[in-house]
Image (tube, coloured by chain):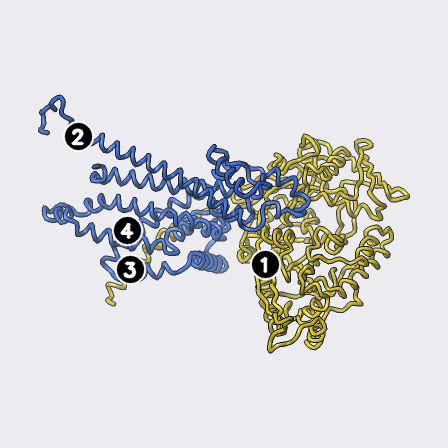
Chain colours: A yellow, B blue
Amino acid sequence: MSAMCRVRRAGALLSALIPVLAAGAWAALAPASAANLRYAEDQAPGIVNPLFGTTMAEARIYEMLFDGLYADDPNLATVPRLAQSAELSADRMEMLILLRPDLRWQDGSPLTARDVVFTINAMKDPGTASTEAGRAAFIAGAVAVDDLRVRLTFVRPEARPEERLQFKILPAGRFVSTTIKRTDAFRQNPVGSGPWRLAKYNDDNSISMAANPGYKPAPAISQVTMKEVSDKNYQAKLLLYESLEALVRVLPRDLPVLENNRKVELYPYQTNSWWYLGFNMMDSALSDVRVRQALSRSLDTASMLAPIGTGDLLSGPFVRSSPYYNHDVPPLRPDPSETARLLTEAGYTRTGNQWTKGGKPLTLRVTAHQSLESAQEVVINMQSQLQNAGITISVEFLDEAAWKSRIWGAHDFDLLLSQWSFDRNEDIREQFVTRGARNFVGYSSPVVDSLLDTARDAVDPAVRKQALRDVHARLAADAPMLFLWSLDSYAAISTRVRNVLIHPFYFFTFMPSWQMQ
Amino acid sequence: MAPGERASPGRADPALAGIRAGLLRVLALAGGRLLWAAASLAGAVALIQAMVMLAPGDAIDLLPDAERLRPLLAQEWGLDQPFAQRLWTGVARVATGDLGHSLSYQPGRPVAELLLLGGRSSLGLLLPAMIAAVGGAVGLGWAGLRWGWVRRWVRGLSVIPAFLTSFGLISGINALCWAMMEAGWIARPGWFTLPDAESVLRDALAALVLGWASGTLAGLHRQAELDLQALLSAPFVDAARAIGAPVWPVVARNLLPVTAGMAAAALPAILGGLVVVEKLFLRNGAGAMLWEACRLRDYPLVTGLAVGAAAVVCAGGFGSDLLRLWSDPRLRTP
């Protein structure tokens, strides 16, 4: 190639870059945006109305914009928030709640007992189709005694009703009736009583919030911006480049980089979330407990967990720090001889590298949710382990709508890799009670049903604890699912933010006390 | 007709006849295009609706406690109807100009409003991308005729997928800028960090990737080279050369219908590329909206966006035809 050719080529390349460089230079003159606390969510809330919450991103926004009668304190003890005090009747079927006298909505109007009654009735109104209806199902009725007092009656005796009264209260004056549509104008112009108010929906799907001047004590951070960053790979980068101040959950692979960055601090927090491998008990092969146990025994869960992060291996449906976790039941260890014994007992024979029954190989399909972080690594690992054990495995990933339709609706699956997350009540009833709303594995046990009833109705915490520990033991034996692990969760927050305390479920509950340099 | 000579009564004025013929041609073209547009719109609406409806799950499935809510919401959202009826209702509603309301993307928000919001943002990307694609193809096509390596370079560029180009550009520029900031050489620019902050740089990069990446440029470039080659050896260019007149004005004028055709041909591909590029560059346009609407099974929004996209393609084709008719008198002759 001649020198002239090289020069021409370089010239052509440079001329192609000119618009880019010019735009960069021009943009470099623009000033950086003013400081506020910016955090990222994978997906911006489609709607801001606590009656219709569907995602954790929405739950976190509600935490900033709205208040409940009660809330958690930093020790996760339930303390009054909008409520000032309460009296529980001797039979625990009635509760009289006194509201704080100085309460105001963000538009300046007074917050009264009428708003509390309205919210409960709206949640329970079948015409509203609230996704939060279950949270008020324990309340039989609500009456405003006067502006500051609400009388609640319960469906059955309640030991600690205040723990279930953390749902957000809405302003009655903003609605025509308790039958509220998802399309109600409130979604665009929400008014709450929380520490921040919604200032603006931005065109890039971000949401700007400004401190509520009437909130006491006033939040130290005056502005909060939720940014939609759908690609998780970008989120950690944005924090490193100081384009974000907070990342709700760090991907395990980003931990080392963030850990070594002096401008970012990692905050571990314990979530009530655990992974599981569900077995479809309506499937002919998996209806046999020996097959389920054999599958459980053929998997080395520790080696499946190691590549995706750190955490605790589990033997039941609670995290290890839960009071309901039964420490007498150890997590399963892989045991090929036990797998072989159980499958032989179930009528399978080993033919070469494959377990067969009636000439048909034992073939199963693992289904996982597309958005489950690190699911791909876990599924591939699991597939390899099960195939080594003589079980043929195929794999599929589903998006949210297909997941709900296929798994929840049609029960069309064999093995299911997923995760459950719970709030502080750790209510596993719907997951395991016969025909429970979330019991899509088809588990049914009269003993477990009875224990779950006992736990639900128990007034004495010790009775509830024992019943749920027994449920744990029973589930470990019946193996409707293989309980895998709870992952350690880390939030990453800029060192410019001080006094950080994180709520394990709602994340921003204690943010009014955060400070920013 | 010689100057001063008057047209005799009873004989058609050739100039007027030419204009009339030209008008008739435009009207015939417009009529044909309108029919084609209507058929395309109906087809696009039906096809994309059918595809999203046939995908497993619906907008109610995405809600917690979906089974409890289904009886009420299915009726309200019309999801309890048989497939064919839902499909027909969707097409019929669009025909009456009613695009409905979003179900799950931004529940309750009119689709027309979302379409306008997304469309405005996408148009700001689409137009520069079209200019980059067609301009780049013609420029590089001309260069390719002279230097063979340009052709190889364009082909090489076209095999790199758009997501890889975007990722490389974004990561490279961010890393470089951050290193310079850390070294104290520059202050934090307003566009930093790509693609999070809205900026001219982000939009320029997005337009370049949209116009040039994933084979769009290579296809156009090949076409441009062939057309340029044909033009440069055309008799009228030889004639211009022979009389010593400048060649480029002749070539440029005759290039106009060619580039209009290229732009119309590239429009569907570039429009389709919006889905990926807008997601990668975190732009909240119609493409990113379509992605989310499909994911969230928001049928009215998907339908509205399909209508919008089909309308843009039809309008682009019509505009290109008009431009060709205007710039090439031969096409106006019946």
Assign a secondary structure to mark 4. Answer: helix
Q: Position of residue B88 (x, y in %)?
A: 50, 39
Please indicate whether residue A245 sits to the left or right of residue A316 in the image: left
Q: On what subunit does the disc labeled 1 rest?
A: A
Give the foreground label among 2 and 3: 2
The residue pinned by badge 1 equals A263
Q: On what subunit does the disc labeled 2 rest?
A: B
What's the distance in space between the residues labelled 1 and 2, CA to CA?
77 Å
What's the distance in space between the residues labelled 3 and 1, CA to CA?
46 Å
Give the foreground label among 1 and 2: 2
Assign a secondary structure to mark 3. Answer: helix
The residue pinned by badge 4 equals B138
Give the foreground label among 4 and 2: 2
**Label 3 sits on what residue type?**
Val
What's the distance in space between the residues labelled 4 and 3, CA to CA?
12 Å
The quarter of the displayed image where residue B215 is located: bottom left
Q: Earlier in the sequence, mark 4 or mark 2?
A: 2
The residue pinned by badge 3 equals B150
Q: Please indicate, yes or no, whether residue A320 appears anywhere in the rendered image.
A: yes
What's the distance in space between the residues labelled 4 and 2, CA to CA?
35 Å
Give the foreground label among 3 and 1: 3
Q: Position of residue A176 (x, y in %)?
A: 68, 30
Assign a secondary structure to mark 2. Answer: helix
Q: On what subunit does the disc labeled 3 rest?
A: B
Q: Are marks 4 and 3 on the same chain?
A: yes
**Label 4 sits on what residue type?**
Val
Q: Are marks 4 and 1 on the same chain?
A: no
Q: Please indicate, yes or no, whether residue B184 appears anywhere in the rendered image.
A: no
The residue pinned by badge 2 equals B15
Q: Position of residue A102 (x, y in %)?
A: 76, 35
